[in-house]
Amino acid sequence: MLRFDRSVQTLAVGTAILAGFVDAIGFIESGGFFVSFMTGNSTRLAVGAAEWQKAALVAGAIIAIFVGGVVSGSLIAAKFRRKRTVAVLAFVTLLLGFAMTLRFLDGGWPAIACLALAMGVVNAAFEGQDGAVVGVTYMTGTLVQMGHKIAHALRGEGDGRWLPHLWLWAGLVAGATIGAHITLWSPLTGYGLAALLSAALMLRAISIARIAD
């Protein structure tokens, strides 16, 4: 995150907002499962398996779809390389638009599956200088990094730049809060706004790519 310039950092925060927004939609629509936070689903799978509940199968299916999205996003990123962020966000926008269509047709679980696929794909949008991808749909690692940087700042040594990590986490929380409010009011509106936000991020990525060229 810190290796990116300011414009790309802002785009990453915007993508975290999208991830939180979509995760809130999925959580509400599925009755308590996640479409971007697979640690939570892994715990639900384990508890469901221990109690012999159908929740284990649901959580496992969502995890598998998410991983499929990660694979798809990685393949898209490898194909387009320098334009990876634009290409990945374009595909995410298509998937969210398709999820909205499924929801309009009363798709239920197919729409939720499409959300999970999109959230897997979006994790391939950003690549650090060391080749590692920057996860924007989960925040445990981000919070750990923030804690380490705060400790560095308190000691007065090492890299103490913790604010970018805070903004990334805050973006996801803000997106989830807004997404929950809107989805509770009108689920279809939530799906539509998620697709529009993704499209706006894609256009911003195109603008950044043009400046970089």
Image (cartoon, helix red, strand yellow):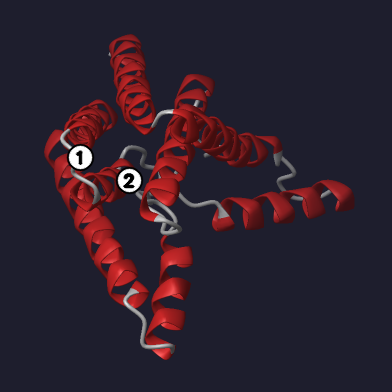
Q: Is residue 80 above or below residue 159?
A: above
Q: Three-letter amino acid code at disc 2?
A: Met
> Label 1 vs label 2: CA separation?
21 Å
The residue drawn where x is 26% and y is 43% is: 118
Nearer to us of marks 1 and 2 is 1
Q: Mark 2: give few (<14), some (14-19) or many (20+) Cα within 10 Å.
A: many
Cβ–Cβ below 8 Å for labels 1 and 2? no
Q: Secondary structure at mark 1?
A: loop
Place of residue 110 in the rendered image (x, y in percent of width and height, measured from the top left): 18, 49
Q: Is residue 67 above or below residue 60?
A: above
Give 156 or 125, whichever is nearer the viewer. 125
Quadrant location of the C terminus?
Answer: top left
Q: Mark 1: give few (<14), some (14-19) or many (20+) Cα within 10 Å.
A: few
Task: Count up the numbered dots.
Answer: 2
Place of residue 117 in the rendered image (x, y in percent of width and height, measured from the top left): 24, 49
Residue identified by numbered label 1: 106
In primary-sequence order, the first of circles 1 and 2 is 1
**Residue 140 falls in which quadrant of the image?**
bottom right
Place of residue 65 in the rendered image (x, y in percent of width and height, measured from the top left): 22, 59
The residue drawn where x is 58% and y is 35% is: 177
The residue drawn where x is 30% and y is 64% is: 63
**Residue 30 falls in which quadrant of the image?**
bottom left
Give 112 or 104, whichever is nearer the viewer. 104
Give 136 or 111, whichever is nearer the viewer. 111
- Residue 172 seen in render: yes
Q: Which mark is residue 119?
A: 2
The residue drawn where x is 30% and y is 26% is: 195
Q: Three-letter amino acid code at disc 1?
A: Asp
**Residue 83 falls in which quadrant of the image?**
top left
Place of residue 206 in the rendered image (x, y in percent of width and height, measured from the top left): 28, 15
